[in-house]
Structure formats: structure tokens, C-alpha cells
Image (cartoon, rainbow, N blue to C red):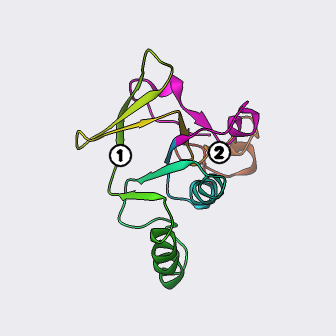
Amino acid sequence: PFKPDIPGIEHAITSNEIFYLKEKPERVVIVGGGYIAVEFACILDGLGSKVTLMYRRDLFLRGFDLDVRNHLKEEMSKSTVDLQFNTNPSAIEKNEDGTFTVTTEAGDTVECDCVLYATGRLPKTDSLGLEAAGLKPSEDGAL
């Protein structure tokens, strides 16, 4: 899983670690706009967590049908999920009581018990010998 290089990123978990939490977080910030981020936002909201979903663009699920994306936004707006579009975290601070403060690039803050990054995965193609097969991966390893 990809996690950006921001102060405090070591406090964030990914979709790998969420299954190993000992208890459900009461307040969670989920960063990302793909189906994993949206899915976990809905699951945790359904389990009673206070969920804040932060996404750096105008609307989540880029690449999906626009009508579906807009409909899902409308439906999720009826839930208790706090949808924050055009929002990008700039730092995560661990507080003395074990909670976290997420600060955005705009300077806003959100207090939470867990920060989940669902911002995609990097390709693991470096050891496949793609060049020998005549394939040239991009700088990040994608084909």
C-alpha cells in the first residue's frame, strides 16, 4: 500500500492492518477516493464509527461512471460519513492520550482514534525481468 511522505505517517494504518485492530475505532479518518476507501468508510459507518473521508479531488471513484459516483455521493451524504473533498492531509500528530490529530493542507484539523490510508498500491514489478521481455515499465513500475 502507498502512504505519502508526510509528518506522522507512521501512525497511519492501511487496508492490510485494519483487519488486525483489537477494537473498532470510535472516530476514524480515511484518506483516499478509491473503492477500498469508500467501502471501508461505509463499513465503519455502519458499525457505528464516526467516519471522516478525505479525498484530494472533487469526487471519489475516479474512472467509474459519473452518474454512479454522483449517486453514491448523494447517498453517502445522507449517512453520518463526513465527506471532505478537495482535502489532503499534511500531518498526523499522536496525542498524549493515544488519539490522533490530522491536519489538512488548508489548516483544518480532525481528531480521531485511527487514520486509515487507502490511497492505492504501488506495482511490484521490479524483480519480474520485464526489460528482458521487451517491456518498459514506468518510473513507478507500472506497465
Q: Which mark is residue 123?
A: 2
Q: Secondary structure at mark 2?
A: loop
Residue furthest left in the image: 106
> Which quadrant does the C terminus fall into?
bottom right
3 displayed left or right of 59: right
- Residue 111 sits in quarter: top left
In the figure, 68 relative to 130: above or below?
below
Q: Measured from the top left, where is residue 62 in percent x and y?
A: 49, 67
Is residue 66 something that shows in the picture? yes
Q: Amino acid at mark 2?
A: Pro
Say whether residue 10 is magenta. yes
Q: Which residue is mark 1?
A: 88
Image position of 57 with respect to 88: above or below = below
Location of residue 35 by image quarter: bottom right
Residue under the point 49% across and 60% down: 80
Q: Residue at x 55, y 75 (%)?
A: 64
Residue drawn at point x = 68 percent, y = 39 percent: 18
Magenta span covers which residues? 1-27
Residue lying farthest top? 96
